[in-house]
Image (spheres, helix red, strand yellow):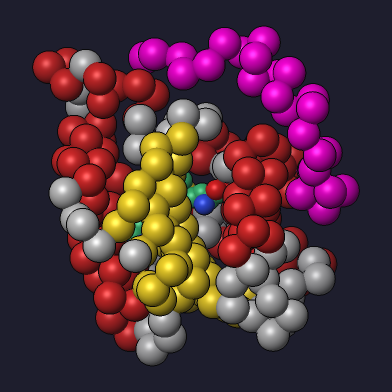
Amino acid sequence: MHRLTDPAIDQYCTEHSTPESELLYRLNRQTHLQTELPVMLSGHLQGRVLSMISHMIKPKTILEIGTFTGYSALCLAEGLQPDGKLYTIDNHEEQTELARDFVAQSAYAHQIIFKIGKAADILPQLTENFDLVFIDADKINYGLYYDLVIDRVNTGGYILSDNVLYHGDVVALETAGKNALAMHAFNQKIKQDNRLENVLLPIRDGIMLSRKK
Ligand SMILES: C[S@@+](CC[C@H](N)C(=O)[O-])C[C@H]1O[C@@H](n2cnc3c(N)ncnc32)[C@H](O)[C@@H]1O
């Protein structure tokens, strides 16, 4: 596995970014104590990036695919308009209990709406259009989720897709596993879609930032 950034650089970037709120710090810690795969959590640095992007967009509607313990949902919600809503989907109900607990303690309890089930089943049931979409669930289905949401993204809206460098394995396709191959196929797919402008940010595991023209 490639390391995308030197750990000392990661640490320096984190130390020179705004600290996590006390609530996010506690959620980060509880996720590490209570879940088997805490590495799935966005974490301090990526969380601040998500919050900053959301503040820049000032979305009225956000869709997140992949809630986990709610860390990224809480970060994205920081930029919501006062009457805005964030819908977050996960198929692992037990896992979202921590998310519900921490969202209830936050200022965004009335704005974050949980949807439990497979994203491919839930997405067609949603009636809203979105200013910002964060794709962060099973890697193999990113292309499907993209197809299901693209017509629901407002013109000038954004899609953020996480883990698109997949530990750097996307540059060594001959030895890459199925998730890295799926990420490469996704990156190629959206590169060829001229409805979008894309920039791939080498932050953490790679975030694709796409704007719908
Ligand atoms: C990487 S974690 C999300 C991390 C979270 N966004 C964060 O940054 O803190 C991926 C989540 O996607 C969920 N997931 C996986 N496959 C799914 C599917 N088919 N439909 C909905 N959720 C799914 C998993 O249960 C897991 O909680």
User: Which residue corresponds to the image point at 38% horizontal and 89% vertical from the top-left?
Assistant: 127
Residue 80, above or below 45: below
Q: What residue is rendered at 25% in x and 62% in y?
A: 195
Name the spot of residue 147 as percent of width and height, x first: 22, 65
**Which image quarter: residue 39?**
top right
**Residue that protrudes farthest toward the left in the picture:** 174
In the rendered image, residue 141, in percent from the top left (x then y), is placed at 24, 53
Q: Quadrant of the C terminus?
A: bottom left
Which residue occupies 46% across, 14% down? 3
**Numbered circles on residues, count:** 0
Left or right of residue 108: residue 58: left
Please determine whether, in this image, residue 139 is positioned above or below residue 123. above
Q: Which residues are magenta?
A: 1-25
Observer-nearest of 30 and 115 = 115
Q: Is residue 16 magenta?
A: yes
Indicate whether residue 112 is drawn in magenta.
no
Decide if residue 138 is in sight here: no
Q: Indicate the position of residue 22 as horizontal and vertical percent values.
A: 87, 48
Across and down, in percent, residue 83 comes to: 69, 85
Q: Quadrant of residue 188?
A: top left
Judging depth in this view, the residue of 183 and 101 nearest the camera is: 183
Residue lying at the far right of the rendered structure: 22
Q: Name the image quarter holding residue 180.
A: top left
Foreground of the two, 75 or 36: 75
Q: Could one spot residue 176 in this view of the protein?
A: yes
Q: Is residue 53 left or right of residue 22?
A: left
| 151 lies above or below 29 | below
Q: Quadrant of the N terminus?
A: top left
Residue visible at 39% across and 37% down in the picture: 200
